[in-house]
Image (cartoon, rainbow, N blue to C red):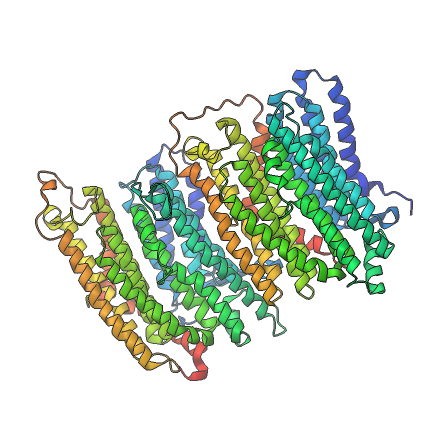
Amino acid sequence: MDLLESWALSLIVFLPLVGALVALAIPKEREEAVKQWTLLVSVVTLILAVVVAARFDFGAAAGFQFEVDVPWISAIGANYHIGIDGISLPLLVLSALVVVLCVIYSWQHWDEPRNPRAFLILMMILATGMNGTFVALDLVLFFIFFELVLLPMYFMIGIWGDRTMRKIPGFRKEVETRLYAAIKFFIFTLFGSAFMLLGFLALYFKSGSGGQQSTFDIPELIARGHLFEGTFAWLVFGAMFLGFAVKVPMWPFHTWLPDAHTAAPTVGSVLLAAILLKLGSYAFIRIAIPILPDTARDWAPAIAVLAVIGIIYGSLACLAQTDVKRLIAFSSVGHMGFVMLGIATLTEVGINAAIIGMVAHGLITGLLFFLAGSIHHRYHTREMSRLGGNLKLMPVMGGILGFTAMASLGLPGLAGFWGEFMALLGSYQPLPGLSTSFFRTAMVIGAIGTVLTAGYMLWMLQKVNLGEPSSEWAGKEFQDVDRYEMAAWAPLIVLIVAVGVYPRLVLGATTDAVVGLVETAFRAVGG
Amino acid sequence: MTRIDWLAIAPEVVVAAALLVVLAVDLFLPRERKYWVAALAVVGTTLAMVPVILMAVSGDNYSMFGGSYVVDDFALVLKGVFLVAGYLVLLISVSYIESDRYYQGEYYLLLLSSLLGSMVLTSARDLVVLFVALELTTGPLFLLAGWRKGDLRSNEASLKFFIIGVLSTGLMLYGMSLLFGLTGELSFEGIREAISTGGMASEPVLGLAVLLILVGFGFKVSAVPFHFWAPDTYQGSPPPVTAYLSVSSKLAGFVAMLAVIYLALPAATDFWGPALWLMAAVSMTVANLSALRQSHLIRLLAYSSVAQAGFMLVPFAGGAIAENGLSEGLGATVIYLVIYAVMNLGAFAVVIAGGRRIGSYEIADWRGLGSYSPRLGVMLAVFFLSLAGLPPLAGWFAKFVMFRAVLISTGPAGVWLAVIAAVNAVVAFYYYARVVKSAWFDQAPDEIPEDTETGPTGPLSLAMGIALVVVLVVGVFPGLATFFGDAAAALVP
């Protein structure tokens, strides 16, 4: 039992990495063996995550459980400190689940130049990075995992990505979309995280100013929050903001997102949307706000403004798209805007909204990218002007697309509703000290955003699903959803309904932790 | 005082003996058996590790020749690094040198002489020993750079390197003589004490001396604006020599700089602090921007090594700004040097291996390498991305300690340098990634280069393997590298 306590999280993090190393030893030609092995590893990881969730003490969700804290790089005071609380638990389970579904989906769907072994190895390394980020409680460890996801995604986009040629402003010749998208994704994220690292180091040195040992430990830094104030705190928050906001991504740092999501292979887009985007917003909740609460309050209006711009901009940009995958990518900008708006309110409702919004966006947009991939696979195009009548050609897939689009636009009863609704609710009554009228204005604009979201989603459905199939497809046989697709999508569909009907699935874990976070951070003002 | 502790100079003695054996044996070996020379050189360097390890285990310090020659933790650690770097360069050289089939004995002789120089350098504690050791390190490299004597570029490389080398030596010597004239001392300790007791820390002549010495070192470590010899010399020299130049020769420059600055001139931070701040900032920025436009792999690595020198200078500046920052700065620079040495040699090993197969160092010609030689492709990605500083490859920790050393001072000068370094780290990623992109994302050419290697490939593979393991293990357990930094930091008085 104790063994599980101390090893479960480490296994969840490193099992995929070990799996990747073993897969390296399997000959490239034995594709089936590689696939089965990766499936096994990812399923075991998921089971472990579920076991952790089952044994998680929801009565004490505010504290860290399954904690491990051993010295790692003693010379710089960095520890291997991992643990999980109500905030990270849902995201960890989501991450483990999505990886399994991606392995299943990719069983029969390989983008050129195939090579399943390399692709699955990258996916497993990615899994280690994602899971690790959600459990890391030490800034250096967090940084390592946060960066670890970059490399595999870079290679996924660069090797298996979209090969169409595009004219990019500033480039003399046309370049392949994947090349441009891969490097753009990397440079943007790296730029942010370089500054994030500077912020972490500044925190480290400042944490020693009380005469204590300097530390990278997140809970310890939260306890020493009073040491960080004034211009110093403002600059450090700014540095971390750059790192996290690029990852979320918030407007105006979002421009890498449409390119990366559109160019990535299907599974890459799913992982990007479902998990990678969450790393940034999770870091705000885990690191930036609790360690620098007062500064967070100074920054909150700015974050709210950017979030609201993101909501409106994302929705309007969607309406201008002709490529269905790019439309879904832009919708992420809008949805993450709601998440960030929730965080900016700095209230229990708002932060809860952010987490359930993150989970819902992971489920829904993940599924949407799966669908976009399958549509492309069938029609070999994603141009909405050429699609149409999908519901007639492929009733099951059309149905699922309709369902997911409804979930995405925030239909009550499905998962997407809660994040948007609660974020708006939180903005009605932000943390005392923040301007109520300001946030209520944000709420109104956000509400307009929900209408726009409904608008573009329905517009997309109309273009893709409804109407008569274009004559181009006449006489062609389309295979409806195959069993791998069904196996990968069914859990997402079930969860979208389940979280929608019974949001306590997520909120039950997060509420206590969020209440604890907000109370510790803003006790002084009685938030 | 005159007693010589043989254990303390055993590493140098072993290398010197290997050098003489190589010279003698080479005379009697028929041409087709010349590879024995390489084997002897490798054995010699390996044997020299033994006394280094023995002394490291015993933990004693040795001081000889009136304190001019000291074997302490700092010296031992760096002797170890030089030996390992020399060992790797020897392994890298074997197949390349073998295939050209001329001057093999001389090649290893010169390489070992240079290695001997840099090992003595680590123990030098006065200006004369330091100068002689530094010249012994550099001298043989003038010849090695021009080793392919039929090749015009190689001649150019050698000549440029020589003229710049002599110029920098002259300037450095002038600075040293000023320092001697001012303080009347040659030993670092004596200079330090003379400056502090005589209240000379703000003497203008001291400033001139410091600046001249820094200019000399600037050439040695190829920092901007004293870097312009590097790209041409790197490109023209035989690639294994370039590997040695970019690692051991640069390392030697840094070791000399560390010793002089931290032992002799800690009081003169007002002079070298701002100068090195500027040199660091300009080196990173100029070299990175120039590297963006390179299409030739070795030129790219040349500019990369200039930029990396800039990163290594950052902790110096940080140490000068912060109170008690000196030992932090010294430790950070040494950790950076150690990690840089391994990953850069790994990168050169891959470039040499790939270059022999592809027959070109143009980045565009390397397209699709990952598809027809995944092994080389993976190594290329690992070493280049480690140079870029991405976790979990060892390079991240080098960058990390560098940022740490400069942020220890919370003043604006430190923060600005950290910001400049951070932006540069991102820019640098772009050109390292371009190489990776070419190898992995671009379509392989229609005619895939055949593997036509005739020489022995084992040593080169071994070098790559060692570097790979170090880069991966240190990346995950960076505590291993901090050992070097801590040991070296004990130098600061």
List x then y, in percent, for residue A18.
Answer: 45, 46
Residue beneath the point at 59% across and 22% down: B99
List x then y, in percent, for residue B444.
Answer: 39, 31
- Is residue B255 visible to us here? no
Question: Can you say which quadrant of the picture contains the N terminus of chain A?
Answer: bottom left
Question: Can you say which quadrant of the picture contains the C terminus of chain A?
Answer: bottom left
Whether residue A508 sits left or right of residue A17 in the image: it is left
Whether residue A475 sits left or right of residue B151 in the image: it is left
Whether residue A474 sits left or right of residue A185 in the image: it is left
Q: Nearer the viewer, residue A492 or A409?
A: A409
- Is residue A386 visible to us here? yes
Question: Vertical placement of B371 versus A492: above or below?
Answer: above
List x then y, in percent, for residue A152.
Answer: 41, 47
Residue A360 figure quarter: bottom left
Question: Vertical placement of A46 versus A295: above or below?
Answer: above
Residue beneath the point at 11% across and 38% down: A476
Q: Nearer the viewer, residue A330 or A276?
A: A330
List x then y, in percent, for residue A463.
Answer: 14, 53
